[in-house]
Amino acid sequence: MAECCGSSRPKQAASSCCGGGGKNVLLYACSGGANVAEIADRAARRLMAEGKGTMFCLAGLGADIQGMVQTARDADLNLVLDGCPMDCAKKIFQRHGITNYTQAKVTDLGIEKVKGVRATDEQVAAAADAARAAIAKALMA
Ligand code: SF4
């Protein structure tokens, strides 16, 4: 992980050291209670560990914390990783009018949302692959 990733100072953590190809990429997972949300959360943390971006708190955007909303606006790219078609993370971005994001969705990978089931390592790997591809495609656009 890059030295700045995970810093308690959002502006500094959002510097170019954490993004793919020198870009400032922020990672937001829906991180809900379902298995697919756990997959989203673990995939986002895996990407952060790989230095693909810096994970930030979606709940802060949901709570209208203005500094955190501005951090998302200022990013080169926000990856929004949702678990299911409810699109909770994406809807928070839309509510704030933030458009510099790309989305990956766990259920789009054929993974079923099931109550009381834990994520598997294989499912997390598949979601991480999809998230990496979404970031790469968005940064090339
Ligand atoms: S997107 Fe789906 S899995 Fe994620 S928090 Fe919302 S309802 Fe739960």
Image (tube, grey):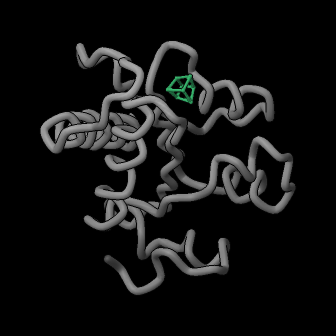
Residue 34 shown left or right of residue 98 in the figure:
left
> Looking at this view, is 32 or 71 the one in front?
32
Q: Position of residue 118 (x, y in %)?
A: 30, 36
Up-down relation of residue 60 to residue 67 (above or below):
above
Q: Quadrant of the N terminus?
A: bottom left
Horizontal and vertical percent for residue 39?
34, 38
Check the image and report above or below for 13 versus 36: below
Whereabouts is ligand 1, in terms of quadrant? Answer: top right
Q: Quadrant of residue 52?
A: bottom left
Looking at the figure, which quarter contains the C terminus? top left
Residue 42 in picture, x, y percent from top left: 34, 49
Q: Does 49 appear above or below 77?
A: below
**Extreme-front residue of the structure:** 116
Residue 12 at x, y percent in the picture: 61, 79
| Residue 56 appears left or right of 111 | right
Residue at the farthest left position? 122
> What residue appears at the point 57 percent right and 21 percent down from the top-left corner?
87
Q: Is residue 55 left or right of residue 51?
A: right
Relative depth, front residue between 88 and 73: 88
Residue at x 24% of width, y 41% of height: 124
Please tell me which residue lies in front, 9 or 120: 120
Tag count: 0
- The residue that appears at 32% across and 47% down in the rendered structure is 43
Q: Residue at x 47, y 56 (%)?
A: 25
- Quadrant of the rendered image containing residue 119: top left
